[in-house]
Image: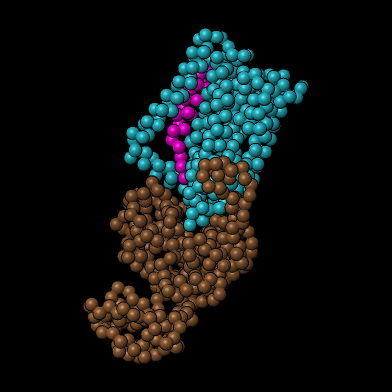
Amino acid sequence: MIEVVNLGKSFKIYKKYEGFTGAIKSFFSTEYSMKHAVSDMNFHIEKGESVGYIGVNGAGKSTTIKMMTGILVPTAGYCKVDGIVPYENRRQNAKNIGVVFGQRTQLWWDLPVSESLNILRDIYDIPHDKFKSKLGFLKEILGLDEFYLTPVRSLSLGQRMRSDFAASLLHEPKVLFLDEPTIGLDLLVKDNIRKAITQVNETLGTTVILTTHDLADIEEICRKIIVIDDGRKVYEGTVANLKKEFNKYKLVKFELKPGKTPIKIEGLFNAPEEDVKVTLENENLVVKFKKDKFEISNIVSRILGEFEIQDIAIEEQEMEDIVKEIYLKKGNV
Amino acid sequence: MFKFLRIYSAFIKQQIKSLMEYKIDFMMGMIALGVNQISTFLVIFAVFTQIKAIGSYSFNEILLFYGYSQIVRGIDHLYNDNIWVVGWNKIKDGSFSNYLVRPIPILSHIVMERFQFDGFGEVLIGLAIFIYAKINLGIAFGLAGWMVLGFFFFCGLAIYFSIKLATAAIAFWTVSSGELMSVIYEVNTFTKFPLDIYKNFFLKNFLIYILPFAIVSYFPIAYFLRDQNFISNLLGFRYYHRELLIVFVGFVTVLFYCASRFLWRMGLRHYNATGS
C-alpha cells in the first residue's frame, strides 16, 4: 500500500546570529547549511496494517508524513501511496487518504461541525446515502452528537480531535495518516480515539500510520513499529518482536519496611552494572537485571537475606524504556 | 465547475449565517467602506467645482474612469479575498497544508472559502458613478462595445488575480508576504484616475509593462473615450487601429496570468510546511 524508497528531504537553513546586530548580520548573510530532516528512508507498508511511526521531537516523523500526504516534495528518492506518487498526483492521492494533524484542525473555525462535514461531503463527492450511513457510524463511535451543531472554535480539544477524526474518515480513505492524534487529550478521549482507530483498522481494513509520543497508543493500536532518529530509520518490526528483542531486563521492586532505609546498596551482587543494577526509589529498592544472567529466585533471596521487606512486585520492562534505549543507542541497533 | 459552485454556495450560505450573528461587525464594515467611497467621490467633486477639467479630461470622464475602476476592484474584493490570508498567515502557520490534502484544485479551494461581502460597497458605488457619468457623457457603446468592455472587465479581474497570486506566492520563500501584497495592491489607487494626468513617463510605463494596473481601467475606458491617435500613442506605436488595444490587453493579461501561475507552482514545490 505504501512504498518508501530512499526518501529524503533537506532544507536550507540560513545561518543566524544572536541579538539585534546579529539579526542585521543574518539578514545580509547568505551562508547556509543543509538540514537533512529525512535521509535515505526505506520501508514498506501492506494494506490493512497499523504502523506506529515514532521518534524524538525533530526526528523527521512529520516530514515523512507530509511527503506521503503530498504536502511536501522530497529532495531525494520517492514514495508511493496505493501506486500513486502523492506530490505529483496530489488530488488523486487526496481521495485515497485521510489525514489528522493533532496540532492543527482541518475544519473551518467558524463553521459548526455539522456544516464542516457537509462541505467535506461535497469536496469529496460522497453520495448522500453513503454519507448518511458513514456519519451515523462515526457519530456513534466518536460520540459527536453532543457538540454536532457547535462551531469548531468553541469546541474543547477533545471534541475538536474527535470531529477532526470523523472528518478524515468520511470518504472512506484507504490510508489514514495520524500525526500525534492523542496529543494533549485526557484519558477518556484518548481511549475513545484509540478504540475508534482500532475499529476502523479492523472492520474497514483501513491502513493506519500513526506518529505519537505516547507509546500506549502504539501498544493499543499498532502491530508494527518503525523507529526513526535524526531522519534515519533505526528500527522496523512488529511490536511483539521489539519486546522480545529488547526486553532483556526484568524489574523487581521491594517495598522496604518503614524506617528501614538501607545505607549501602552497592556491591550486593558480584556483577557489572549493566547486568544488574540496584537503585533506591522513594521507599522502594528496585533491582533491574538481565534475564539471561540471573534467576529471579536468586535476586529475591539475596535481597530478602539483606533487608527487611514488606512487599515484592515483579515487572516486565516497559515499552517506554525499550524505546528510550533505542533512541539512546541511535543507529547501533 | 458545477461542483465548485455548489461548494462555493455552501460556504456563502454559512457566511451569511455568521454575518447574522455578528450584525454590528458587518454594519461597521459596510459603513466604513461607504464613508471611504463617498469621501473620495466628494474630493473629486470638490476639485471639479474649482476647475473645469484635469488634463484633457472633463469631470464626467474622470468619473467614468473612477466608477469603472471601483467596479472591477469591488468584484475582485468580493470573490478573491482569501488569498490575503494565505499571504499573511496560512503559509506562516502551516494551515496551508489543509489545502494540499483535499482532492480539489488549491486555487478554487482558496477562492471559495471566503466571500467578502464588503466588496458590495465598492461595486454599488462604482456602478452608480459609472452609470451617472455615462448618461451625462451621452456615449453609447453598442453591442460590440459592450462585448469589448466585457472582455476588458474579465482581463481586469485576471490582472488583479495574478498580481495578488504572485505576491502571495512570495510567502512560500519568505514565510509571510502580507506587507508586500498590500504595498503592491495599493498601487491600484492609480487606476482610479486616467493615467496621463500624472504626466510621469516612468509611472506610466511602470503601470503598463511592469505592474499592469493600466490594463484594469485606464485602457478600457480610454478605448471608449479617445480616438485612434491617442491609443496608438499610448502604446508607443503609430498609425494603428485602436482595436490593437484589445489584442494588447489580452496579450499582457495572458502573459501575467501565466507568469503568476508559474511562480505559484514553483512556490508550492518550495513549500516547507512549518509546524509539526
Quadrant assignment, res A199: bottom left
Give the image location of residue A70, x and y in percent: 56, 58
Viewer-side residue, A126 vs A279? A279
Tell me which segment is drawn in magenta.
B112-134
Give the image location of residue A266, x and y in percent: 38, 81
Quadrant assignment, res B55: top right
Q: Is residue A287 visible?
A: yes
Q: Is residue A50 visible?
A: no
| Colour chain B is painted in | cyan
Viewer-side residue, B55 vs A16? A16
The reply, left or right, for residue B26 in relation to residue B178 is left
Quadrant assignment, res A256: bottom left
Does the magenta run of residues contain A63? no
Give the image location of residue B231, x and y in percent: 69, 22
Residue located 55% across and 65% down the image: A230
**A256 versus A199 height, above or below:** below
**A271 versus A165 height, above or below:** below
Residue located 60% across and 21% down the image: B194
Residue located 59% across and 13% down the image: B54
| Colour chain A is painted in | brown
Give the image location of residue B37, x and y in percent: 46, 24
Residue located 55% across and 24% down the image: B192
**A233 versus B247 height, above or below:** below
